[in-house]
Amino acid sequence: QVQLVESGGGLVQPGGSLRLSCAASGSIFSLIRMGWYRRAPGKQRELVADITTGGSTDYVNSVKGRFTISRDNAKNTVYLQMNSLKPEDTAVYYCNAYPLRWGDYWGQGTQVTVSS
């Protein structure tokens, strides 16, 4: 059974930066396309960025140029560098496979709050 543990969230002022980390268990991590998702208050969870096993990336338009997804297969970890944060980035952030492949499993997520 996979385990995903997100960390790195917090309270930051508009324009600030955070780096999220997601540690995954399991030996197949390097073979799986991964994504960062977020759920803002009152909204559905959305995919914000994904990265292939080879390192190709894609982003939702609202974060392009501000967020960078990366991965370290040796450490079974995927990262999300978030710069120029805006209040509308406030959400709980989760990592998971993209597309989803472990049923309804999600980690606990990490809260990101952008506020002055």
Image: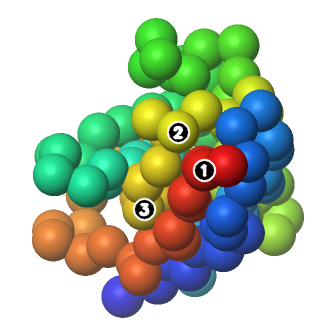
Do we see residue 26 in this rendering?
A: no
Query: Of label 2 and label 1, which has the lower sequence position?
Result: 2
Residue beneath the point at 56% across and 59% down: 112
In the picture, measured across the screen, residue 68 lies left or right of residue 63, that is right
Decide which of 11, 5 is in the foreground and name it.
11
Cα separation, mark 2 vs mark 1, equals 6 Å
Decide which of 115, 19 is in the foreground and name it.
115
Do we see residue 57 in this rendering?
A: yes
Cα separation, mark 3 vs mark 2, equals 13 Å
Work out whether 103 lies above or below 3. above
Report the amino acid beneath label 1.
Ser
Decide which of 40, 36 is in the foreground and name it.
40
Label for residue 92? 3
Which residue is under mark 2? 87
- Numbered disc 2: secondary structure: helix
Report the amino acid beneath label 3.
Val
Q: Residues within 10 Å of mark 3 (few under 14, many from 20)?
A: some
Cα separation, mark 1 vs mark 3, equals 14 Å
The picture places residue 29, in percent across and down from the top left corner, at 58, 62
The picture places residue 80, in percent across and down from the top left corner, at 69, 46
- Numbered disc 3: secondary structure: strand
Report the amino acid beneath label 2.
Pro
| Callouts 2 and 1 close, C-beta under 8 Å | yes
Residue beneath the point at 56% across and 22% down: 63
Query: Of label 1 and label 3, which has the lower sequence position?
Result: 3
Label for residue 115? 1
Residue beneath the point at 56% across and 58% down: 113
